[in-house]
Amino acid sequence: MDSPSQPQAEGPRAPRPHSRDRHGRGMRGPVAPPQVPLSVTRSDAFDDLVRDSVNRLERHWPQLASVEFAVQEVPRGDHGELDEGVEAVPLGQSVPGRDGRPDRVVVYRRPVEIRTRSLDERALLVHEVVVEQVAELLGLAPESVDPRYGED
């Protein structure tokens, strides 16, 4: 015999109508809109620093428009050595163009980030690296590429 405290089993339940979400508050949006810095990755922010530095230099050196600028996480392959067998990790590299390829300047993101503590320091170091690599590519002193080089 069924006791009154137990619910009676009814037939199969009808499916619930689909609502916007489980609690009726609407669909979730992004945590932050795209224009807010929260949604910019470290890699994107670093790319922006390199792009800003290149834009500053291109105003005075129009021939840089034909140079390809790139960002890599870390250097690949063999890089130089310092005294006593200590390896030097480069912050950037310039590669002269050959076989129809354009000249190329590469900035290495991780080594630069490791050497800086703040965004301002990072921006200064990125600019110095870009200036040094452009100077090497053009066969000039960094001070002639950017007169403010080394002042900060």
Image: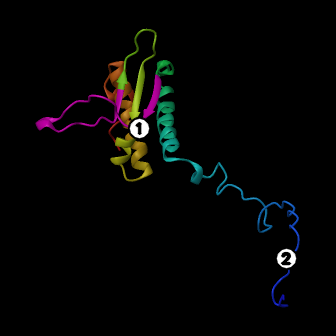
- Front residue of 100/131: it is 100
Which colour assignment does the render follow? rainbow
Q: Which residue is mark 1?
A: 73
Using the image, determine if residue 111 lies above or below residue 140.
below
Q: Residues within 10 Å of mark 2 (few under 14, many from 20)?
A: few
| Residue picked out by circle 2 | 9
Q: Residue furthest top?
A: 99
Element on which disc 1 rests = loop
Q: Is residue 23 above or below residue 48?
A: below
Which residue type carries mark 2? Ala
Q: Is residue 70 magenta?
A: yes
Which residue sits at x=47%, y=18%? 63
Estimate the spatial distance between the alpha carbons at disc 1 and disc 2, rounded to whole Å.
62 Å
User: In the image, residue 133 lies at what x, y percent?
Assistant: 36, 28
Q: Position of residue 75 (x, y in %)?
A: 34, 33
Q: Which residues are magenta?
A: 68-93
Q: In front of the other: label 1 or label 2?
A: 2
Left or right of 69: which side holds 147?
Answer: left
Q: Which element type, helix, strand or loop, lies under badge 2? A: loop
* Most foreground residue, 136 or 112: 112
Find residue 123 and report its image quarter: top left
Q: Of all residues shown, which one is farthest toward the front?
A: 1
* The C terminus, quarter of image: top left
Residue lying at 37% horizontally and 17% vertically, measured from the top left: 96
**With 69 as the anchor, is 77 left or right in this view?**
left
Sequence-first tag of 1 and 2: 2
> Is residue 6 magenta-colored?
no
